[in-house]
Image (spheres, rainbow, N blue to C red):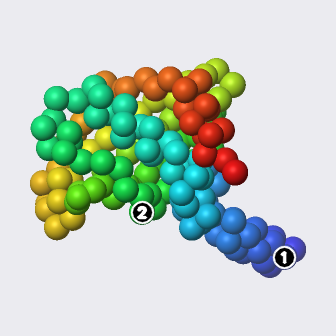
C-alpha cells in the first residue's frame, strides 16, 4: 500500500513539473510576445507612460523596440515580468499587475539598462512607488492592434 502511494505521489509530482509550478511564473511563447500581442502592446504602453513620468534624460532618448521575453503569473489578476529592447540600444525590465475586472493596471517595478552591454541599472519605478496606468486607454490600444 505504501509503495502504491509513493508511486502515485511521483506521478503527481511529474505532472506538476510538466505543467509548470503551481502559482509560479510561466514563460511566454513567441506568439505571446509578437507585435500586436497583449504583451507587446502592454510593454509599449507601459514604457511610453514611464517616459512621460520620468525625468531621466537617458530614457528620453530611447524608444520601445520589441519584447525579448515575458513571464506571467495568474494570481488575483495577472503579474507580468517583461524584458524589452529599446532603440537605439538598452533594455527595460518591467513588472506589471493587471486586473481587468477592476480596471487595475500598474507598473510595480521598472529598471533601465541604458546600453545593450552595460551593467549599470537605473530604477525608474520601485516597490514603494507603483505607476498606475489608464486601463481603458490600454484596452483601446490593444483593440487597435488586433487584426
Q: Residue at x 14, y 44 (%)?
A: 58
Q: Quadrant of the N terminus?
A: bottom right
In the image, residue 58 sits, relative to residue 126, either above or below, namely below
Q: Position of residue 31 (x, y in %)?
A: 61, 64
Q: Position of residue 135 (x, y in %)?
A: 56, 26
Q: Secondary structure at mark 1?
A: helix
Q: Residue at x 29, y 28 (%)?
A: 52
Q: Secondary structure at mark 2?
A: strand
Q: Which mark is residue 4?
A: 1
Residue 86 found in image quarter? bottom left
Q: Which residue is mark 2?
A: 68
In the image, residue 129 sits, relative to residue 81, either above or below, namely above
Q: Residue at x 67, y 47 (%)?
A: 146
Mark 1 and mark 2: Cα distance apart in space: 45 Å
In the displayed structure, does residue 11 sit left or right of residue 140?
Answer: right
- The residue positioned farthest toward the right in the image shown: 1
In the image, residue 4 sits, relative to residue 134, either above or below, namely below
Q: Nearer the viewer, residue 66 or 92?
A: 66
Q: Label 1: how many residues lie within 10 Å, few (<14), some (14-19) or many (20+)? A: few
Q: Give the mark nearer the N terminus: 1 vs 2.
A: 1
Q: Label 2: how many residues lie within 10 Å, few (<14), some (14-19) or many (20+)? A: some
Residue 107 appears in the rendering: yes
Q: Position of residue 54 (x, y in %)?
A: 23, 30
In the displayed structure, does residue 9 sit left or right of residue 24?
Answer: right
Of marks 1 and 2, the one in the foreground: 2
Amino acid at each position: 500500500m505504501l509503495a502504491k502511494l509513493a508511486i502515485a505521489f511521483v506521478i503527481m509530482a511529474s505532472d506538476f513539473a510538466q505543467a509548470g509550478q503551481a502559482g509560479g511564473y510561466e514563460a511566454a511563447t513567441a506568439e505571446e510576445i509578437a507585435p500586436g500581442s497583449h504583451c507587446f502592446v502592454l510593454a509599449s504602453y507601459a514604457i511610453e507612460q514611464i517616459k512621460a513620468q520620468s525625468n531621466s534624460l537617458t530614457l528620453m532618448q530611447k524608444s520601445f523596440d520589441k519584447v525579448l521575453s515575458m513571464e506571467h503569473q495568474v494570481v488575483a489578476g495577472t503579474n507580468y515580468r517583461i524584458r524589452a529592447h529599446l532603440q537605439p540600444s538598452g533594455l527595460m525590465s518591467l513588472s506589471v499587475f493587471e486586473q481587468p475586472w477592476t480596471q487595475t493596471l500598474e507598473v510595480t517595478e521598472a529598471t533601465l539598462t541604458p546600453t545593450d552591454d552595460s551593467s549599470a541599472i537605473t530604477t525608474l519605478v520601485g516597490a514603494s512607488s507603483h505607476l498606475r496606468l489608464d486601463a481603458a486607454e490600454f484596452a483601446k490600444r490593444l483593440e487597435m492592434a488586433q487584426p
